[in-house]
Image (cartoon, rainbow, N blue to C red):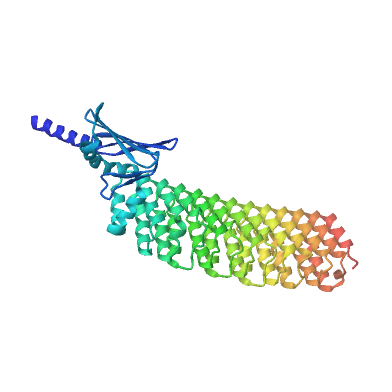
Amino acid sequence: MKSIKYLIAIVALALTANLSAQCYSITRSINGNNRFVYTSNFTDFDVQVNGDITVNDTDTGIESITPGGFLKISMKSFGNKRTLEIRSNSDGALSYEYKEGRKEVPFEPEGRKWLGEVLPDIIRATGIDAVGRTKRIYANKGIDGVIDEINDIPSNSVKGKYFDALLGNIKLDNSEKIVVVRSISRSISSNTERGRLYKRYGDMFLSSNRLASEYFRGIGRMSSNTEIGSTLRSIDKDIDFNENEITDAYFTCVDGMSSNTERGSVLRNLISSQDLPDKVYERLFVSVSRFSSNTEMGSVLRSVPIIDLDNEKVSEAYFEAVNHMSSNTEAGRTLRFLLKTQKLNDKNMISLLNSVRRLSSNTEAGSVLRDVSSLNMKDENISEAYFEAVMALSSNTETGSVLKYAVSNYDFNDNNWRDFFKAVSRMSSNYEAATVIRKSIDKMPFTDANIDKMMYAVSMLSSNSELGSVLSNVLKSEKLTKYAAIQVIVTSEMLSSNTDMGRVLRTVAATPFIKDREVRAAYVKAAEKLSSNAEYRSVMEAVDF
């Protein structure tokens, strides 16, 4: 039992010692005086600095302080306190005041010895003489020596000072800069400090392709979406996206962000600030398709200026991004934007129509289809894609509106009319279907084949009034043919209303085709289907036999 308690005590003591060994630094700047308060190895330090300080080559003493400046060091350890104040007069001459507790002690030799013991830790904690030390370490030990020193520094802000000193005061070659870029992300745990350095020296890091790739990888290692986004948006130098490695590194960085808002902001900035080649737009659209926010996806896609959609890979990537949207509103808005701003070839149009077909909102799908100002309906693939999109609509109102728009704006060939009436025949609303058919009468050539297609659609109407109205409109057309008149008579036999059927037949009697023997025979045959004697007499009396 005693051994267990002893073991627990040892573990607790070890944990306490480990916690106590940590270094916490608080920095304040008041009226040009910088104050550093931190704890290191059971010891509390309070350091005040005014002016620029230079340390000696062994980091054990002070070489100089700018005139009027000072360095104050106060240390408490196990209840004991020591203080040292070093001041520089107007000529730069240094004076020393050293105390142990409240007792002033000569600086030589005890004060100097103590300064030599504590100064290395103070230097690393405060960043005193960072530029001078960086130059000295680099001269003696090269880039690796500086990085090793930085890794021994506890404070992120002080690490940043050394990176500033390294990048701002020493001419580094590209291989050394690569070491620095990597070290910033590995040595500094603060996203804010890393972001500051990446932004400040961004132009330097973009000076070569290999360095630029490492730069974007370094940015991507930050865990803060805000800092990653801010850093990427700060770039105003042209990025060489013709280099595949740079493109991959940049978009890997973007894709690694978990914030859709930041990703969207970065890509919109990229689009507006860089002249992007086609392959970069292709990769950009891939990144957009990985968003989980429809709003951001749509916003980025709608921020794209004129792009080369004749490039199949670019086109495929664009529509793939659109198809990844789960919001009909955003997808529809984006497709309408595309129609208004881009020149679409036939393949692009087929892709757009296929995207429309995927929309589950009749309102959005109909809105996009009505925004298609022109279509090459002679192309069978376009025609097929268009009518598949129309027939995917479940709303009779939207279907009717789209088909009426199509009749008014597109030139149909015989195959188009076939698909048109096929779409009409699937409508469940007699009113909407009849309205569409009546709209088509003025536009459709009255070929025998087209009349057959129309009559098939008409035969799907279950409303006597609507069916009769459509047949009467056909008969009143200036394009009426003998064949059309006969097909109207045959179709009229489907009417269960004697009144409506009689009205249609009397309209036939008013046409010049009633004089034709075949028309008259069909007329009489249909009249015999009337169950109302009054209607039968009226129909027969309308014809001069």
- Residue located at (43% from left, 65% from top): 208
Residue at far right of view: 544
Residue at far front of view: 91
Relative to 66, residue 263 above or below? below
Q: Is residue 412 left or right of residue 234?
A: right
The foreground one among 317 and 475 is: 317
- Residue located at (63% from left, 67% from top): 344
User: Percent position (x, y) of residue 146?
Assistant: 31, 54
Q: Is residue 415 left or right of residue 240?
A: right
Residue at far left of view: 2
Q: Is residue 426 left or right of residue 518?
A: left
**Residue 108 appears anywhere in the view:** yes
User: Percent position (x, y) of residue 320?
Assistant: 52, 61
Relative to 540, residue 46 above or below? above
User: Residue 517: which quarter of the image?
Assistant: bottom right
User: Residue 37: which quarter of the image?
Assistant: top left
Residue at far top of view: 102
The foreground one among 277 and 283 is: 277
**Residue 326 appears anywhere in the view:** no
The foreground one among 263 and 166 is: 166
| Label tally | 0
User: Percent position (x, y) of residue 169?
Assistant: 40, 56
- Residue located at (76% from left, 70% from top): 445
- Which quarter of the rendered picture does the C terminus lie within? bottom right
User: Residue 11: which quarter of the image?
Assistant: top left
User: Percent position (x, y) of residue 204?
Assistant: 44, 59
- Which quarter of the rendered picture does the N terminus lie within? top left
